[in-house]
Image (cartoon, helix red, strand yellow):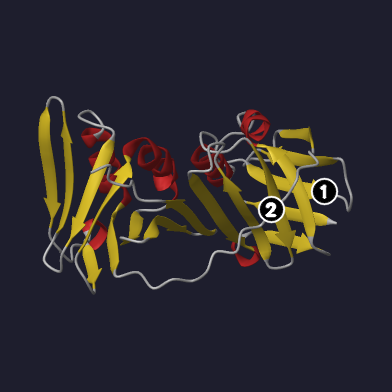
Amino acid sequence: MFEALLSKALILKRIVEALKELVTDVNFECTPAGISLQAMDASHVALVTFILDANGFDEFRCDRAQTLGLSITNLGKILKCAENDDRVQIRAEDNASIITFIFEGKDDDKVSEFNLNLLNLDSEHLGIPEQEYPCVITLPSAEFTRICRDMSQMTETLAIEVTKQSVHFKVGGDIGEGKISLKPKNDGKNKVHLEVNENVSCSYALRYLNLFNKGASLGDEAVLMIATDLPLVLIFNFELGVLKYYLAPKVSED
């Protein structure tokens, strides 16, 4: 038996928003420790993972490990039936063919119940080794979202250059060039922090970075880990767990 209770539906809506344009049908792995997901986009360019800690839920029960295959699109449709501040109860029996969502109004005056069919999906878990990255950038998630959105007006590729003094976001296209530079600052929610062991310069597809930034609504901070020979990792930490996106650098055609 799997059961979980959240005090607000909003966080589930934001998780679906962070996934829906990258992946379609996914397996949610439920264990007594929490819920995890690992999925690649259809073109096998990007990888997304998350871990939702059992302790972050108001109530959580998972008697044994269970895989729940779900359509992200259909899950999003069900969650649209919930108000943002509705309580959400999720239930699935062992070896079930459906998962049940119960939405309760904050004044206990309305209860909605929906059953969503589970999918039998092939599962290929990728071992992601822990890597040391020479550059780790922490900045407001809204700032990184704005940079990627603005730069995508000029081109499809974003170059990120990092030194101990600053980080530069650069683009160049048919209409011209652009650069946004940030220096470290310790200013509360506007903090910019650089951990740099070596200078790094890499380029990435802005299309994917903009999709990744759908996860920015989950956390105020974005953590970027970059290296010349490793995929970029974009991390959003939030009250229920952690969301990570992986994207390989673009290879120069020169």
Q: Residue at x 46, y 51 (%)?
A: 245
Query: Mark 1 or mark 2: which comes first in sequence?
Result: 1
Label number found at residue 124: 2
Give the image quarter of residue 223: bottom left
- SS at circle 2: loop
Percent of width and height locating residue 221:
34, 56
Percent of width and height locating residue 77:
64, 28
Q: Residue at x 12, y 25 (%)?
A: 175
Name the amino acid, label 1: Ala
**Residue 70 sits above or below residue 55 on the image:** above
Quarter holding the N terminus is: bottom right
168 or 223, which lies in front? 168
- Mark 1 → mark 2, Cα distance in angstroms: 22 Å
Q: Which residue is mark 1?
A: 92
Name the amino acid, label 2: Glu
Give the image quarter of residue 25: top right
137 or 4, which lies in front? 137
Percent of width and height locating residue 173:
17, 30
Percent of width and height locating residue 59:
70, 60
Q: Residue at x 65, y 64 (%)?
A: 54
Q: Is residue 171 visible?
A: yes
Around disc 1, counting alpha carbons within 10 Å, would you say few (fewer than 14), some (14 to 19), or many (20 or more)? many
- Circle nearer the viewer, 1 or 2: 2
The residue lying furthest to the top in this view is 175
